[in-house]
Image (cartoon, coloured by chain):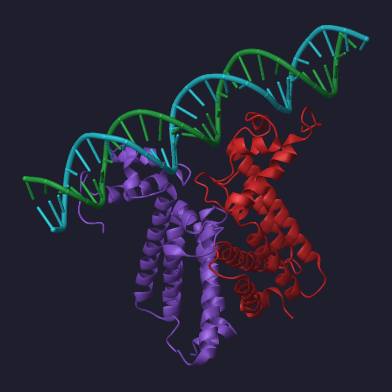
Chain colours: A red, B purple, C cyan, D green
DNA sequence: TCGCCAGACTAGGCAGTGTCTAGAATCTAG
DNA sequence: CTAGATTCTAGACACTGCCTAGTCTGGCGA
């Protein structure tokens, strides 16, 4: 599938690229297929060869967003340093991404009415798995696994909430960084964190 | 302003009510002014007398959502019990609201491109003030105020993140409740919580 | 080599939408 | 009772997403 450039070149890639630009410029509501086609220099029906729906395009954008964010977090996690230091980097990466891609985050975390399934959901699962990977340094027993899951969820929820507050401009960037620093301090000092990361 | 029923009765109220129904039924995208007018039994231009814009209607809905959520949290906070117990109730109220009004939450926490201002932002500020009120049992000195602010932000961020994860069906309702319980435990056991609520 | 065909793309049309306008209907204040 | 302001109607316009028929093109098998 998705073989070679055909008539236009590689329209699909151009569409996705321009779509991200429009998303940044004028939000989700400002992203119209016809305007997108206009910018790409093709007829208004052309995008339909690559995206059956407007929603299909939005889903694709969201999925790519998840993948990019996942990669950012992976990179932060690969950095040398203590667990605390790397956790800080991860938090900053998350919050930075939310700040610089506010509209895209809306797309990624828009409330779905249907049941969770499909590639977007899978991409989200893959994102959250990143947090899990960092916590399995001691994978001893079911107790540890349960603790790790709760620790992970708590950390993710805090990051996500901070990201939302930042993207909606309810708090500033510095406040956001303080929140994640505080969150990490509190989490690592807690009983939950102590059980997971002794020493 | 907003005196008495005129031709129709009180259209504005009917529109807002029906709009919330449509929001719940088919999300933000499914909320059209013309369909709304149809359901209210008025011509397609009638809503314009009460809402200059579609966005004005959405803003009004968001503001009302903030006010309702604020009232819910106030009620939870008024309940008798220890601080921990009331904090639990607040967390549950927040998360329940997000679960039952997912599309509305999207509206309330959609990323804004502009600077924060206007009635929606004010309503959001009022919401977050509720958390502050619960924390000023000992208002001694600047240090305490700073701690209270950080505590509040951390708590709010966690609630908000949990709400998003729940509304997007990334986690279940029971997981969400565990997250807020864990968050409260961790926060109250922390140094930050200890400084604020000694004893 | 050549015909053929799946896929990319064009162009037109349709229903639906948000917004604007002029004007009728209605309420309210003087 | 009249005059003005407000609510509402009806029509128009530009724009949107989606559908359809038909054209073009690149690659593959005979």
Residue at image coords 65%, 53%: A125
Horizontal relation, residue B35 to residue B13: left or right: right
Label count reads: 0
On the rendered image, what quadrant is the N terminus of chain B found in? Answer: bottom left
Q: Position of residue A29 (x, y in %)?
A: 54, 46
Who is closer to the viewer here, D14 or B99? D14
**Could you say where residue A181 lies in the image, as x and y percent from the top left?**
65, 76
Residue at x 70%, y 34% (from the top left corner): A41
Question: Residue B186, relative to residue B38: is it above or below?
Answer: below
| Residue situated in front as seen by the camera: B90 or B6 | B6
Image: B160 above or below B20: below
Q: Classify residue A102 as left or right of residue B52.
A: right
Residue B176 spot, x, y in % from top left: 52, 62
Which residue: 51% across, 65% down? B116
Task: Report the front residue among A67 and C27.
Answer: C27
Q: What is the x, y in percent for residue C9?
A: 70, 27
Residue shown at the point (64%, 60%) measured from the top left: A98
């Amino acid at each position: 599938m998705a073989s070679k450039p055909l008539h236009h070149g590689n329209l699909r890639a151009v569409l996705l690229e321009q779509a991200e630009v429009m998303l940044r410029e004028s939000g989700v509501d400002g992203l119209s297929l016809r305007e997108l086609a206009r910018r790409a220099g093709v007829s208004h029906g052309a995008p339909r060869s690559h995206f059956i729906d407007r929603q299909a395009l939005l889903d694709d954008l969201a999925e790519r967003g998840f993948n990019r964010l996942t990669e950012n977090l992976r990179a932060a996690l690969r950095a040398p340093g203590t667990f605390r230091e790397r956790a800080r980097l991860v938090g900053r990466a998350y919050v930075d991404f939310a700040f610089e891609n506010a509209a895209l985050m809306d797309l990624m975390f828009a409330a779905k009415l249907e049941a969770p399934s499909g590639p977007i959901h899978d991409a989200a699962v893959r994102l959250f798995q990143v947090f899990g990977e960092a916590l399995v340094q001691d994978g001893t027993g079911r107790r540890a696994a349960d603790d790790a899951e709760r620790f992970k969820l708590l950390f993710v929820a805090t990051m996500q909430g901070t990201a939302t507050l930042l993207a909606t401009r309810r708090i500033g960037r510095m406040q956001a960084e303080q929140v994640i620093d505080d969150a990490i301090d509190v989490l690592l000092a807690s009983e939950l964190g102590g059980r997971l990361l002794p020493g």
